[in-house]
Amino acid sequence: KNQVEQSPQSLIILEGKNCTLQCNYTVSPFSNLRWYKQDTGRGPVSLTIMTFSENTKSNGRYTATLDADTKQSSLHITASQLSDSASYICVVSELTNAGKSTFGDGTTLTVKP
Amino acid sequence: EAGVVQSPRYKIIEKKQPVAFWCNPISGHNTLYWYRQNLGQGPELLIRYENEEAVDDSQLPKDRFSAERLKGVDSTLKIQPAELGDSAVYLCASSLGLAASTDTQYFGPGTRLTVL
């Protein structure tokens, strides 16, 4: 069964600090991996997408990495801001099966002043 | 451009009552998804439409859930009768539908359902 595991489940950091969120997956065959940001009471919003041949992708202060060999990804947030407080969800899509996506349960990040 | 619109935003009902959620996708998006998201978990796909055809409804509890997408635009998700375990956020998403595996899904704000 395809799975996406995220860690930690929750994280509290001080404003201005950096942090790294982890995502491990077993989805196969692999097509792409996305990181979404979900603010409280809102739907998820796509931050980055990486295919098999990409090992890093940046979006402002967000940098995602992908190691397709070990089936691991990370999302690094630099110089955190209060507005970064949200849930970050890792989503992995299959190459076949009409691109079916498997969602992780997310990491809840709280940035404190 | 307007994003994915969902209504209502909140709904509180008693168990065994029916409930319906409405979704208007982004204009021009052929693919529409309904997800259920429980607290502290990621979204779970209920049904995916390509235009008006339901192409993946394997996770839809068909004994009480139904969905339709008439004319391939708006969609309605219905639960009848609702159970306590149906309390969750119901998310609608849409995508262009050009290439399924790399299509970016755009999510609506969701409908938070509470079943008492």
Image: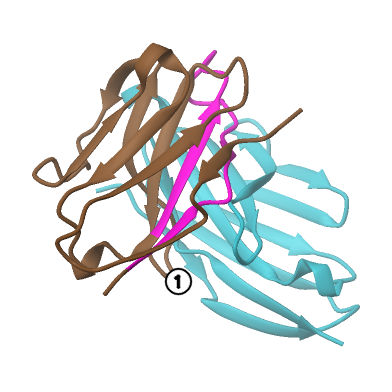
Chain of the residue on which disc 1 is drawn: B
- Residue drawn at the location 50% of the way across and 16% of the way down: B30
Q: Residue, x 64% and y 37% (percent of image)? A: A50
Q: What residue type is labelled 1?
A: Gly
Give the quarter of the figure containing the C terminus of chain B: bottom left
Left or right: where does residue A78 sit relative to residue B104?
right
Q: Does the magenta stretch include residue A61?
A: no
Residue A112 lies, with reference to residue A64, above or below; the image says below
Q: Can residue A69 be seen in this view?
A: no
In the foreground, A36 or A62: A36
From the rendered image, report the letter of the chain displayed in brown.
B
Question: Magenta segment: does it hold B110?
Answer: yes
Specify start and end residues of the magenta stretch as a single range. B89-114
Residue at image x 59%, y 73%? A108
Chain in cyan in the render: A
Q: Quadrant of the N terminus of chain B?
A: top right
User: Residue A12, percent across and down?
Assistant: 69, 85
